Amino acid sequence: MNEKPTYEELERKVTVLENRLKEDNVHRIWDVYSLSNIPTLIRNAADGDIIRYNYAMQRLTGYSHDEMPDVNAWLDNLYPDPTYKAAARKISEKVRRGDVNLREFELIVTRKDGRQLFVEFTVFGIYDLGRSTGFQVVKAVDVTLKKQAKLELKRVNAELNRLNSELDQRVKDRTRDLEESENRLKLALEGANEGLWVIDIVGGEMNFTEYSAQMLGYSLDELGSTSEKWDELTHPDDWPSVRQGLQDHLEGKTQAYEAEYRARTKAGEWKWILGHGRVTKKDSQGRPLQLIGTHVDIDRRKRAELEMQKNERMFRSLVESAPFGLTIMDSNGTAHYVNPKFKEMFGYELEEVRNPDDWFKKAYPDKAYRRKSFEMWESAVRRSELDEDVEPSEGKVRCRDGQEKHISFRIVHLAEERHLVTYVDITDRVTAEQELLRRENELELKSRNLEEVNTALRVLLEQRNADKSDMEEKILFNIRDLVVPYLDKLETTRSPDMQKSYVDILRSNLNSIVSPFARKLSARYMNFTPREIQVANLIKEDKGNKEIAELLYVSESSVEFHRHNIRKKLGIINHKVNLKTYLQSLQ
C-alpha cells in the first residue's frame, strides 16, 4: 500500500512546479525581447544575476553577456567613478528590492570604449498569475542626443537671459537719464544727435525737438504738434510693430518702449530710426499721462547690420556649396562646424571629429605621422594668429572608409579665437606627379643605359679598328713566314718532287692564312717563332717529323725540339693530347 506524501514533500513539489512556471514565463518574455532593437536584460532580483542579455544591450554598453554576469560586474564596468558607482548601486539596490516605487531613472554610463552616454532605464517585475516571479526586466534607452539638446537649449536660454539683462540694464540706464531733467536731457540729446519727443497722452499732443525733424529733412512746423504726421511717415510694414510696442508699454507690459523702424524722409527715401521712450507721469490710479522718448538715426548702423546679415547668408551659402572641405575650429582644435563637402570627402560627421584628439587619431592612425601632423597644425595656428601668410600644408588623411587621400589644407584666423580650415583633395594630382616622377626615373635610367650602350659601341668600334690593323699585320706576318720562304725554295730547287711538295705547302699555307686556324693561332700565340708557326702548320697537315725536316731543310731533332716548344706554349705539355688533333681543333 502506497503511503500518502507528506506535507513537506507536497510543498517541495509545488515549489519545483512554481519555479518551472517562473522559468517558462521568463522564456516567453525573452522571446519578445531577445531580438528587439531596445537594449534589454532580465535579472534575478534575489541574487542580482543577469540571466538574459540581448544584442541591443551589448551594442549600447560595448560589453557582452559574459562580461556582465551580475549586477556587480554591471556597476564596475559602467560606473568606473567610485562616487558615482556608489550612487548608482544605491538606486539599483532599492529598485531591485522594491523599497521605492521607482521604475524610470536616468544615469550616465561609460561604454567599454570610454564614451559616456546618458541612458534612461525602465524596470518592471515579471509576474505570473498575479504573483511575482522574482525576475525583473530592465530596458535602456540612449537619450544622449536628447540630453545634449536640452543642455544646448539651456545654454541658449542662458545667453538669451544675459542679452535680456543687458537690454534691461540699457533701458534702466536710459530711463534714469530721462528722469533727471527734460531741459538737461534736451541739451544732451542735441549734443548726441538724438531727437527728443514728448507725448501728452491726455491732451493728444506730440512735440518734437529740432533734430527729430532735421533727421528726416523736415521743419518742426511740417511735423506739427501731434503724432499724426510722424505716423504717416512710418513704413507701413513697420507700423504694426511700432504701434504694438507703444501699446504694450502704456499697458504696463514692458518697462520701456523701443522699436527700430523705417521712416520716409522728405526726399522720399527710407531711413532707419530707433525710437525709445518711457512713461514719465501717471495719475493716482496708475494710468499713463506723459511719454518721453528719443529718435536716433541708426540708418548707417542698420544698413551695415542688414548687409552683414546678407553677407552671412551669402557666406553660409558659399560654405555649404563650397567645392572643398571646410571646418571652423577654435585655437584648441575643437570643431564647431563642418560643411557638406568635408563630410563627403572624409565620411565623418561633426560629432565624430569635434574633439581634436579623436579627429587626429582617425585622420592619422600612424603615431609618428600623427605627431608630425599635429606639430605642423600647431605651427600653422600660431602663424595665422600672428596674421602671417600661411602657405597650404599637404599630407595623407585616413577617411572613415579606410581610404587614404592626399589633402592640402590651409588655416585662416578669424575673430574670437576661431579658425577657418579648408581641405582640398589633391590625390589625383599627387598620383599624377608620382607617376610622372616614376616615368622620369625610367627615362633617366634608359638614358643612362643608352649612354652605356653608346660607350660600349664606341669601345667595340675602336677595338674593331684595332683588330683590323692587327689583322693586317698578322696577314703580312703569315705571308712573310709561310709563303715567301717556300717561294724562294721553289725557285732554287730543280727536283720535280720537291717542287710539287713546295707547291702543296704553299697551297696549304695560303689556305691556312685565310682560314680561322691561322688567325686564331697568330692571335692567341703571338710568342710563336716563325719556324714554330711553320712546324705547327705542317703538323696540322698530318706531316711527320721526317717529312717536315725535309721540307724545312732541318734535322729531325730540330723538328722534335719545335714540337716540344709548341706543346709548351699551347699549355698541353705533359698532357695526353695529340698535337695534330689539338691544332686542327683550333681551325
Image (tube, rainbow, N blue to C red):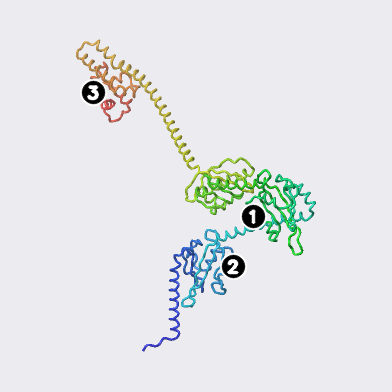
Q: Quadrant of residue 266?
A: top right
Residue 265 in percent (x, y) is at: 68, 45
Front residue of this view, candidates 488 and 508 = 508
Mark 1 closeness class: few <14, some 14–19, many ≥20 residues within 10 Å:
few
The CA span between labels 1 and 2 is: 56 Å
Q: In what element is the residue under mark 1?
A: helix
- Which residue does the image show at 56% across and 41% down from the upper left? 392
Q: What type is the residue that disc 1 sits on?
A: Pro
**CB of mark 3 within 8 Å of CB of mark 1?**
no
Q: Which mark is residue 542?
A: 3
Question: Residue 258: in sight, yes or no?
Answer: yes
Q: In what element is the residue under mark 3?
A: loop
Mark 2 closeness class: few <14, some 14–19, many ≥20 residues within 10 Å:
few
Q: Is residue 554 left or right of residue 263?
A: left
Where is mark 2, residue-wise? 87
Which of the image's four quarters has the C terminus? top left
The mark total stands at 3
Q: What type is the residue that disc 2 sits on?
A: Ala
Residue 51 in percent (x, y) is at: 47, 69
Q: Is residue 446 above or below residue 6?
A: above
Q: Which mark is residue 240?
A: 1
**CB of mark 1 within 8 Å of CB of mark 2?**
no
Q: In what element is the residue under mark 2?
A: helix
Mark 3 closeness class: few <14, some 14–19, many ≥20 residues within 10 Å:
some
